[in-house]
Image (cartoon, rainbow, N blue to C red):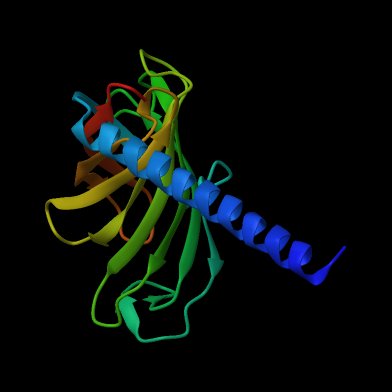
């Protein structure tokens, strides 16, 4: 093969590669544009999360003991850097005996050096009700002493694919260094084409 034909082949290769890249970018931009204009359907639900730190049925386990400043009293005190992994039951009402709707699976980290504020990251896995088999992901800042907190919904699967929204989060009951029941008022927006 001559030098001229090698150069011509290289030019064709670059032209075809560039055209494929431009086409891929155009299709991606078109898909995002379609989704941006797509109607969104609201969904709302109320869940109660049972964060059990004690006993043989514990659903929240500290996997890293923080070594930073003390952020919450008790014995031993909770410290900055403590990491807790959860697989909490979600129920229809505040009573743990009420109907189970799913699980909250994830973790929280004592992420403030100046008070009991958490970085919360969890998947809500629904196993009963109209959204059974679907999940959504909650991430955010949780100042556990505030009466009302707001965390973000950043995605999901099943009926909640590409969901956005927020959770209004209240403590229904809490025994320091023990068990808590959290009241989750969930507001989701799901793309109609998801």
- The residue nearer to you, when weighing 115 against 173, is 115
Above or below for 136 versus 108 = above
Residue 51 seen: no
Above or below for 23 versus 39 = below
| Image quadrant where residue 118 sits | bottom left
Left or right, 145 with respect to 8, comes to: left
- The residue nearer to you, when weighing 118 against 132, is 132
- Quarter of the image with the N terminus is bottom right
- The residue nearer to you, when weighing 162 against 106, is 162
Question: Farthest residue toward the right?
Answer: 1
Give the number of callouts: 0
Residue found at x 51% / y 45%:
59
- Quarter of the image with the C terminus is top left
Residue 151 percent across, percent down from the top left: 24, 51
Residue found at x 47% / y 84%:
67
Left or right, 105 with respect to 29, comes to: right
Left or right, 163 with respect to 87, comes to: left
| Image quadrant where residue 109 sits | bottom left
Residue 55 seen: yes
Question: Farthest residue toward the top?
Answer: 130
Residue 15 percent across, percent down from the top left: 57, 55
Residue found at x 35% / y 20%:
98
Residue 167 percent across, percent down from the top left: 22, 42
- The residue nearer to you, when weighing 59 against 161, is 161
Above or below for 46 versus 120 = above
Left or right, 123 with respect to 148, comes to: right
Residue 10 percent across, percent down from the top left: 69, 63
């Amino acid at each position: 093969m001559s030098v001229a034909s090698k150069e011509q082949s290289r030019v064709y290769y670059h032209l075809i590669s560039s055209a494929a890249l431009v086409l891929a970018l155009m299709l991606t931009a078109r898909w995002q544009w379609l989704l941006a204009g797509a109607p969104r359907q609201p969904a709302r639900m109320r869940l109660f999360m049972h964060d059990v730190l004690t006993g043989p049925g514990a659903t929240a386990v500290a996997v890293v003991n923080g070594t930073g400043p003390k952020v919450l009293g008790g014995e031993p005190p909770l410290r900055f850097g403590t990491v807790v992994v959860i697989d909490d039951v979600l129920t229809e009402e505040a009573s743990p005996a009420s109907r189970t709707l799913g699980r909250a699976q994830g973790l929280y980290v004592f992420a403030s050096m100046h008070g009991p504020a958490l970085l919360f990251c969890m998947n809500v896995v629904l196993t009963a009700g109209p959204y059974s088999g679907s999940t959504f992901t909650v991430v955010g800042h949780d100042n556990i002493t505030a009466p009302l907190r707001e965390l973000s919904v950043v995605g999901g699967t099943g009926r909640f694919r590409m969901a956005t929204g927020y959770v209004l989060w209240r403590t229904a009951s809490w025994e320091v260094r023990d068990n808590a029941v959290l009241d989750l008022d969930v507001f989701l927006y799901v793309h109609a084409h998801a």
